[in-house]
Amino acid sequence: MDIPNKADLLSMLPSELETFIAEQGEAKFRAAQIYGWMQKGVSWDKMMNLPKRTKEKLSEIAEIRLPSIREKHVSKLDGTVKYLFETCDGQFIESVVMRYHHGNSICVSSQAGCRMGCKFCASTLNGLARNLLPSEILGQIIIASADIGERISNVVMMGIGEPLDNYANVIRFLQLVNLPDGLNIGYRHISLSTCGIVPKIYELAEQDMQITLSISLHAANDTARSAIMPVNNRYPLAELMTACRDYFDITGRRISFEYTLISGKNDSEKDAAELAGLLKHYMEARPFHVNLIPVNEVSERDFARSTDDDIKKFVSALEKRRINATVRRRLGSDINASCGQLRYHAQKDH
Ligand code: SAH
């Protein structure tokens, strides 16, 4: 952890910022001015209505940890924008903005790297460098929104990192992004995806935020799941699925199950039947959704995408068992919009 010991202003709630500014002997209204600028992605030098003396004094003891854009790739197919950001201390992270009819969605990173070790995933290739601060998660949205010049109205925490492995910072980020004077993004417009850190799923349920929880399932029995997701050795399916059921019972929010289709590994009709059995056994009559994601082939990883025919058969095997599943549309396929591969290569070349 290589973070200088300055106050992290963008991670503060407005009331905390006000107290901090007052403690420095500055007028309280300065806090609102600084807060407003930060939400627009503006750093000290361009805060026009602040005296130079105040900015100099504050920037010695405090910082605004907005990430900078290092690379930007725009899909010619669907307008998807992928950013490689650099944090103040030289960590690389990625975000993807997806343009839908109902508005712009952003996929944000929660950690620089990841220590979960999923076998098909590029984000975990070099392990975890460090947790992102709330400001650095929020900053991805602020800078991307300023860059495209449009509001971003939906957030998915499905970028690099395991959000529940950076629990406290992620909760603070969720509080910040929801503030009416901030980005004002409603909890119902936010999804958080986890590989299944069971105790944190219970903690999250108790927060009573109306966010959508996505579970990266990817296999329907412990042997298959442990082979591709080491986290399953610690929290096997019985515990994870019980937590999902409890999460629904506590929050009333429908769970979304993610299932990556890997050719010859988990994409047979028998696998579909087993998945249907698992979901029905634990969720019973509770509503849930299944999202099928044809695996993105990562050059460092040896997994192949299922054929279209196998995907179709998998979906109908689920439907036959009255389970609705959607196959995720691949956005930005020409810019390799998923994966964490930009970070991996940027880090290697640095
Ligand atoms: N750590 C969290 C969120 C980040 S990954 C989680 O595990 O849920 C977001 C989703 O992309 C997860 O479902 C993850 O399993 C999936 N994913 C990772 N690598 C992938 C790949 N190569 N192809 C398809 N999906 C992948």
Image (cartoon, rainbow, N blue to C red):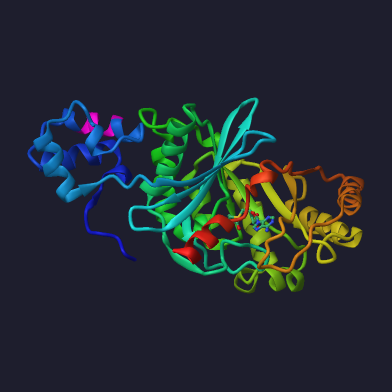
Seen at 50% across and 66% down, the residue is 348
Q: Is residue 293 above or below residue 97?
A: below
**Region of the chain picked out in magenta, as a range:** 31-36
Q: Is residue 228 above or below residue 31?
A: below
Q: Position of residue 292 (x, y in %)?
A: 76, 49
Q: Position of residue 107 (x, y in %)?
A: 55, 44
Name the one closer to the observer, 27 or 39. Answer: 39
Q: Position of residue 38 (x, y in %)?
A: 31, 35
| Res. 109 visible in picture | no
Name the one closer to the observer, 149 or 211. Answer: 149
Tell me the quarter of the picture where residue 139 sits: top left
Q: Quadrant of ligand 1?
A: bottom right
Q: Position of residue 293 (x, y in %)?
A: 74, 51
Seen at 84% across and 59% down, the residue is 267
| Res. 130 visible in picture | yes
Tell me the quarter of the picture where residue 227 sits: bottom right
With 301 as the anchor, is 279 left or right in this view? right
- Please say whether residue 123 is one of the residues in the magenta stretch: no
Q: How many numbered marks are there?
A: 0
Q: Quadrant of the N terminus?
A: bottom left
- Please say whether residue 34 is one of the residues in the magenta stretch: yes
